Image: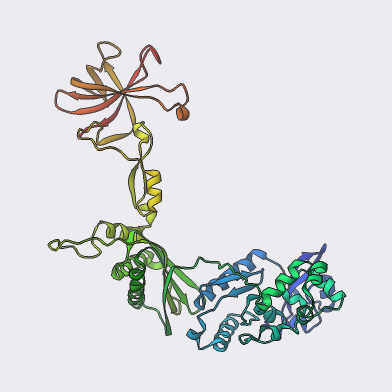
Amino acid sequence: MDGRPETPPIAVTGLAKNAIRIVALEDHASRQGIQQGQSLSDARALVPGLEYWEHDEDADKALLHAIAAWCERYTPLVALSGEDGLFMDITGCTHLFGGEACLVAGLAARLNAQGLSIRLSIADTPGAAWAMARYGTQRVIDEGAGRGAISGLAVAALRLDPATVTSLNRVGLKTIGCLANLPRAPLAARFGFPVLRRLDQALGREDEVISPLMPVAELTSEKRFADPIVYEDDIKRTLGILADNLTPLLERRGLGARECRVKLFRVDGDIATLSVQTANPLRDAGQIARLFEERLAALHDGFDAGFGFDVIRLEVCRTDPFEPGQGSLTEDRQSGYGYDALIDRLGARLGTDRIRHFILADTHIPERSFGTAPVVQDKARDRTLCASSPGQDVITRPLILLQSPELVETISQVPEDPPIRFRWRKVFYDVARSEGPERIACEWWQDGRGSHTRDYFRVEDGQGYRFWMFRNGLYGRETTQPKWYMHGLFA
């Protein structure tokens, strides 16, 4: 872009061939004789007042990814093309913008308004579009006219390496049309198979798959606005409409949404993305909209509408089979107020990682036999983390477990018997009755071979308080002075 004609030109420099050279420059600099690839010393000899900045590759990548995200307003299939370009698969999208010519004109006008200088072209194949955008001037290549449109372009437009381009030019093969008319076998034998592959991709003889930056959503619904919307109430109403549009699609597939994402495209190019996850497959449009209302409420001052949003898109990113249950005729339950709905709303407001539940672990050590995990997670992961526990009619484990076992002073008749009196937290207790032991061996693979076996006892004092205690170490075999610990309380 030529943004400052009255000031010295600007160029970007980088290290190439052991010299600092011009990597990029503005039109104002090229008109004064500076060329890309020229050394900085030669460029400053031509223009002493040249302003130059060191090339920042990370900033270029970040800018290219930002442009790619912005281009998702036209199609969700946006992929990188090298270090300075993008591929967009607009199949089935052009009618939304008034046709291919209108789409190209609108895209170019918007990006130019953001201060970007671009070259773009629409063609049947990615190879033809790439060639025309960089080496031609035609913006829209009609269907079936790709071969004739690119035949006059240089062979470098086939995305070949510089050495191959030089070899082709040396024998007089300077255009794509020259290659297209040659016998294939001799061409491959002399210049390699990649030349034929790139030629076939450009002419549509071989399919070329592009890899979108963002995973494609299973279902999508979006709404465009002639006048951008700013108010949160308008956004909420739009989300309700979009959720209603997706519900019939989920019903036809027998699916329910597990993860949804909303993208709000601002007119200044910024994109706000909100995601919610559900504990179980969800198909209720009203409940999906309420989850995003909770998400918007959690943002508070972090939500910036700027000059407004002109596109809002709701995507269903992940689904699971939906199994509708038979409701009760007498049960008075409103949609969105059950246990699963509560989990979803809390997760939308606080974050799914903060809503956790207890899970069992495959160990006999009491303090390690359970943990916590997010409630909203894949069912397969639930089966991996949780161990099944058979039902028991008699409660043998306390409901209250101390965070860590606490040392207890005890008096016993013999070392292997339960205590008849003990002191815990500076209070003495006389044991009225006891039951045990329940022996739990150590986990030597974690604690080492020097760890001790535990003998657990259920102990009750004269006032009816019940405790869960254990003797650490087998008397005479593991230790001569076993210690006692308090580990839990029975309610």
The spot of residue 55 in percent (x, y) is 70, 67
- Tell me where residue 368 sits by quadrant: top left
Q: Is residue 150 visible?
A: yes
Residue situated in front as seen by the camera: 486 or 9: 486
- Tell me where residue 277 sits by quadrant: bottom left
Question: Is 113 displayed left or right of 128 in the figure?
Answer: left
Q: Is residue 163 visible?
A: no
Residue situated in front as seen by the camera: 181 or 355: 181
The spot of residue 42 in percent (x, y) is 85, 73
Vertical relation: 445 (above or below) 136: above
- Tell me where residue 160 sits by quadrant: bottom right
Question: Count the marks: how many?
Answer: 0
The spot of residue 386 in percent (x, y) is 36, 43
The spot of residue 224 in percent (x, y) is 43, 82
Residue at x 32%, y 74% (from the top left corner): 244
Residue at x 76%, y 68% (from the top left corner): 161
Question: Is 437 displayed left or right of 79 in the figure?
Answer: left
Q: Which quarter of the figure is the C terminus placed in?
A: top left
Q: Which quarter of the figure is the N terminus placed in?
A: bottom right
Residue situated in front as seen by the camera: 94 or 437: 94
Residue situated in front as seen by the camera: 254 or 400: 254
